[in-house]
Image (cartoon, rainbow, N blue to C red):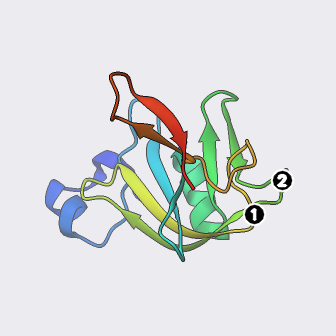
Amino acid sequence: MATSPDISTAEREHGTQLAPRFDAAGLIAAVVCDATSGEVLVVACMNEEALACTIKTKLVHFWSRSRQSLWMKGETSRNTLRVQEMRIDCDQDAVVIRAIPAGPICHTGARGCFYRRVDLEGDEPILTPVA
């Protein structure tokens, strides 16, 4: 895996080399969707180590900004995310992962982290549960 400045824009956008562009904090956005339903389960950050561990083990790893440490999703709950497919965006600074969840993914116990809808119908937005 190459690091950010090592390749041309054309190669980054149209080539076959994985060369993620990490931000100033060394992170890229990672969106994880259920491989079967397509539902968005979680959005988190990955650093180079988390991305490499995810590719190697096929289990999703993230970088915890609050704890400043690498963690594998499910390392304590056993609710892991097994990678089925990984995609990277055009400029290689975000990934989308289709995964098979081994249980609830959100720390609240919800299936995924996006269990509330922002209702924009009234004067003020309110949150309503997604069925």
Q: Along the line of sight, which residue is nearer the eye, 123 or 59?
A: 123
What is the x, y in percent for residue 29?
44, 45
Q: How crowded is mark 1: few (under 14 residues within 10 Å), some or many (20 or more)?
A: some
Mark 2 residue element? loop
Q: In this view, does 118 lie above or below 34?
A: above
Q: Distance between the residues labelled 1 and 2?
A: 9 Å
From the viewer's side, name the closer residue of 80 and 105: 105
Could you tell me if the residues under marks 1 and 2 are in contact, i.e. CB atoms within 8 Å? yes
Q: Which residue is drawn at 48% across and 51% down?
A: 30
Q: In this view, does 20 lie above or below 103?
A: above
Question: Of helix, strand and loop, which one carries label 1?
Answer: loop
- Can you give x and y, in whole percent of width and height, for residue 98 in the image? 51, 69
Q: Which residue lies furthest to the left in this view?
A: 10
Name which of mark 1 and mark 2 comes first in the sequence.
2
Which amino acid type is shown beneath numbered disc 1?
Gly
Could you tell whether 97 is left or right of 20 in the image? right
Taking the image as shown, residue 107 lies to the left or right of residue 39, namely right
In the image, what residue occupies the spot 59% across and 47% down?
113
Against 46, residue 36 (above or below) is below
Residue at screen point 77% across, 55% down: 74
Residue to which mark 1 is pinned:
103
